Image (cartoon, helix red, strand yellow):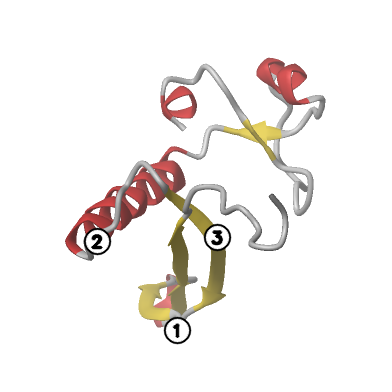
């Protein structure tokens, strides 16, 4: 993700990519459409930093923690208004989302009791 912020790597847009221009760095991911999604990467990095501090607060070993589940859900739209010509007003909506990470602490290998 740091490489995306430095414009050294690109995130491919394989779906919903109408109107996204081609980039030369897309050759690294074998797809021709992609973007440097800096704002999204910054938000995800902040969530991961928060996740690490929450794991430390719960008493988990952060070296053994592994993300087991990631879910993104639609949230309530933010409603604002924009002013148009001839005294009209149009909605100016923002599409928000909820992101959740589930983390588990992986234990070491456990030997079976019936096998020696």
In which image quadrant can residue 26 be found?
top right
Marks 1, 3: nearer the viewer: 3
Could you say which is closer to the camera, residue 1 or residue 88? 1
Q: Residue furthest front?
A: 116
Q: Earlier in the sequence, mark 2 or mark 3?
A: 2
Kind of element beneath mark 1 = loop
> Residue 9, position in %: x, y?
57, 22
Residue 59, compared with residue 73, is above or below; it is: above
Distance in Å between CA atoms under marks 2 and 1: 26 Å
Q: Residue furthest left?
A: 57
Kind of element beneath mark 3 = strand
Could you say which is closer to the camera, residue 110 or residue 103? 110
Residue 30, compared with residue 103, is above or below; it is: above
Question: Which residue shows up at 69% across the image and 49% down it?
Answer: 116
Distance in Å between CA atoms under marks 2 and 3: 15 Å
Question: Which residue shows up at 47% across the image and 66% down it?
Answer: 102
Residue 34, compared with residue 41, is above or below; it is: above
Could you say which is closer to the camera, residue 65 or residue 26? 65
Q: Residues within 10 Å of mark 1 (few under 14, many from 20)?
A: few
Q: Name the residue that disc number 2 marks.
A: 54
> Which mark identifies residue 76?
1
Q: Are marks 2 and 3 in contact (CB under 8 Å)?
A: no
Q: Residues within 10 Å of mark 2 (few under 14, many from 20)?
A: few
Q: Name the residue that disc number 3 marks.
A: 68
Kind of element beneath mark 2 = helix
> Residue 90, position in %: x, y?
47, 79
Q: Earlier in the sequence, mark 1 or mark 3?
A: 3
> Which mark identifies residue 12?
none
Distance in Å between CA atoms under marks 1 and 3: 26 Å
């Amino acid at each position: 993700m740091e490489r995306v912020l430095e414009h050294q790597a690109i995130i491919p847009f394989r779906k919903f990519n109408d109107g996204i221009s081609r980039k030369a760095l897309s050759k690294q991911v074998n797809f021709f459409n992609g973007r440097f999604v800096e704002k999204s990467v910054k938000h995800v990095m902040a969530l991961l930093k928060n996740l690490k501090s929450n794991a430390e607060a719960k008493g988990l070993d952060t070296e053994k923690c592994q993300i087991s589940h990631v879910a993104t859900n639609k949230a309530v739209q933010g409603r604002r208004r924009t002013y148009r010509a001839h005294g009209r007003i149009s909605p100016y909506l923002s599409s928000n989302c909820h992101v959740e990470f589930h983390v588990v602490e992986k234990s070491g290998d456990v030997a079976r009791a019936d096998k020696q």
